[in-house]
Amino acid sequence: MSISEKNKAEQLLEFDRIKELWAEYALTDAAKEQIRQAKPILSEAELLVKQRETSQGKRMIELCGNPPLASVQGLADIVEIAGKGDCLGVEQLLQVQQALTMVSRLKRYLCQGKQYEISLSYYEGNLEALDELRENIYVQIVNEQVSDNASRLLKTLRGEITLAESRMREKADAVMRAYKECMSDSFSTFRNGRVCVPVKKEYKFKIAGSVIDKSSTGSTLFIEPTACADYYAKLQELRMEEENEVRRILYELTVQVYNNGEAIKENIRYIEKLDFIFSKGKLSFLYDGAEPEILTERRIVLTDARHPLMKKEVCVPLQFSIGDGINGIVITGPNTGGKTVALKTVALNCMLAQCGLHVACKEAKICMNSNFLCDIGDGQSLSENLSTFSAHITNVLDILRRVNNQSLVLMDELGSGTDPLEGMGIAVAILEELKKSGALFLVTTHYPEVKVYAEKTEGIVNARMTFDKENLKPLYRMVIGEAGESCAFHIAKRLGMPDFMLKRAAAAAYGEEKPGGQSEPVEQERICNRQSGKEDASAYETENGTGHVEEAEEAEKEFRKEFSPRIVKKKTPATKKARGREYQIGDSVMVYPDKKIGIVCQPENEKGVLQIQMPNKKIWINHKRVKLHVAAEQLYPEDYDFSILFDSVETRKLRHDMERKHMEGAELTLEGTEAERAEMLGKKNRQKKEM
């Protein structure tokens, strides 16, 4: 099985989630990585060993408690550093000492298991506590530093260092007492590793010594007295000797680590191995697992099987058996009835067993499988442009290319996602190929024809998921040897579907009524009656009657009287058709049917007719043939003189001259259009003044 195929099966069966939980019980990085890489074991001898380890690890935890394991991350690197001749630091040596302490405790823990004759406990003999190295590190490194008692010389040097520091303090205090008036503070201090006295700037020449530092303001100088300088030089020599002695001690411990390097590495390997084994035992406690019996023949028998990711108190135990001449099981039943969960429960427990883990069952007999081939979920992919049916067929063809007589195949909703009649035919063809391969397979379906095929075909049986029709609750129990019902009519009726709709559904589904007076063949009706829940429809019609047309019609009317909200469209004034006097002078309008743009030069009259200024002419037109394009307010200022648009040059010139001077015999007549325009402009000006 390739990595991609393995990951796909793990995700579909949720084994990847099991791995996440499993990894939480491991403490070492190597064990966590081994868990991530775990896959079904194909060697029977190896699998039996792994199962035995899991059982013994669980029993050890049950009898002796959790093992005293801890992470050994970085310990192998420390051994490598020691092997290169580099000096190990205090923290690294402490890590070695802690690891050896853990080894010592682990040996005592494993020894407890010997009294119960648990063979896993004999790993104790492969661990070396290295008591001498552990004790040396424990004695020579205290409080994360090399102890004073690590050597006589180190103890002597640190005593002299303490004495020299004390003498330096005494000399500094003596200077401060002698020159108290020159000091800015009453305490000496350390600056750059030297003892200094705080001297006021103006008295710096009164104190014999060297200026080491000054305050941020410059008013205080920190001076090392000459008497202290002699002790400082001696102190530096002592500290160099101390550092050399500490380094010598660390080198000695490093050599001891190097000399025991192989034993430490061997300890690491067994710690990681035991960590992996005990993590399997801890995981078994999580879902109350049991060791399965590994079979050589092609047979799977699960007693009180559960999905390991579901809580035990809410999970309905599954009784399952396949093999002994039965290679395929067709599972039917209502939606949400637990068909897919049943598929995953069987396959996931088989995968757990083949990875050396306990199964979530009371008892289990499980055969080994060369591969786990799954088609679960709709598989839609926008990136690959796959529909539900296309994805199913792609997966199925891939499965059929790789299936063999040692495979375990799972297919959910076989033949779904396309025309029911064609999907049924494809489902039967797939089952035929699976039967020929000799593989063990479980499929779920709603097709009645597939149920009939399973009933008639040797080596394939039906199974159903039980359903409480009265309370509309799935019971999540599998009954092998019986075909299930969809229970669609019962569910729909209990959820409130009206009788007239149920009768029409029954007629359409089972061929009693079809458009054009056609009906299904007799054989098809027989199949539906027996396998797909027609009994439910027949019972429904017997209970409620097939007549009572008036009651059905009345029920249909009542069913449709329920209130339903309506969509309210937004009103847009700019696109609303003008009515009455809504068109104003200067409005830009669209004139139909020519779809030409004009300008209103006279509003509508009582007959709904308005005058439009078109290119080179004016026309009278009914308001129904006009649609507002742009309002005048958006085109012109409020005091715009529309005579520029609508009056002739001669009329405008005459009006201009009459406004300037008296012209004998001249007369300007305001006809209908201009009179009304003048009245409207005057009205707008009055409204503007009032505002």
Image: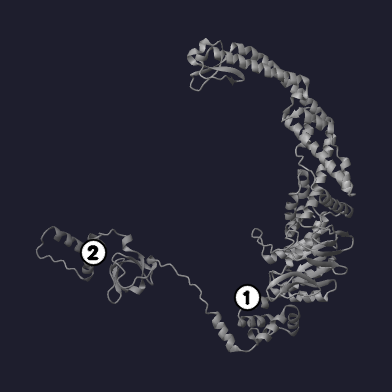
Tally of numbered discs: 2
Between 126 and 14, which is closer to the camera in this rendering?
126
Between 39 and 493, which is closer to the camera in this rendering?
493
Please say whether residue 403 is visible from this viewpoint. Answer: no
| Side of 679 relative to 277 (left or right) | left
Residue 302 % position (x, y): 82, 64
Residue 611 % position (x, y): 29, 71
- Quadrant of residue 638 in the image? bottom left
Task: Select label 2 or label 1 by which is in front.
Answer: 1
Circle 2 is placed at which residue position? 681
Q: Quadrant of the C terminus?
A: bottom left
Circle 1 is placed at which residue position? 495
Work out whether 623 lies above or below 28.
Answer: below
The amino acid on which the numbered mark 1 sits, given as a three-letter code, is: Leu
The amino acid on which the numbered mark 2 sits, given as a three-letter code, is: Leu
Residue 502 % position (x, y): 64, 81
Q: Which mark is residue 611?
A: none
| Crowd rating for badge 1 (residues with CA inside 10 Å; few <14, some 14–19, many 20+) | few
Question: Does dot 2 land on a helix, a strand or a loop?
Answer: helix
Residue 285 % position (x, y): 78, 54
- Quadrant of residue 678 in the image? bottom left
Q: Quadrant of the N terminus?
A: bottom right
Between 192 and 486, which is closer to the camera in this rendering?
192
Coloured how?
Answer: one colour
Q: Residue furthest left?
A: 664
| Crowd rating for badge 2 (residues with CA inside 10 Å; few <14, some 14–19, many 20+) | some
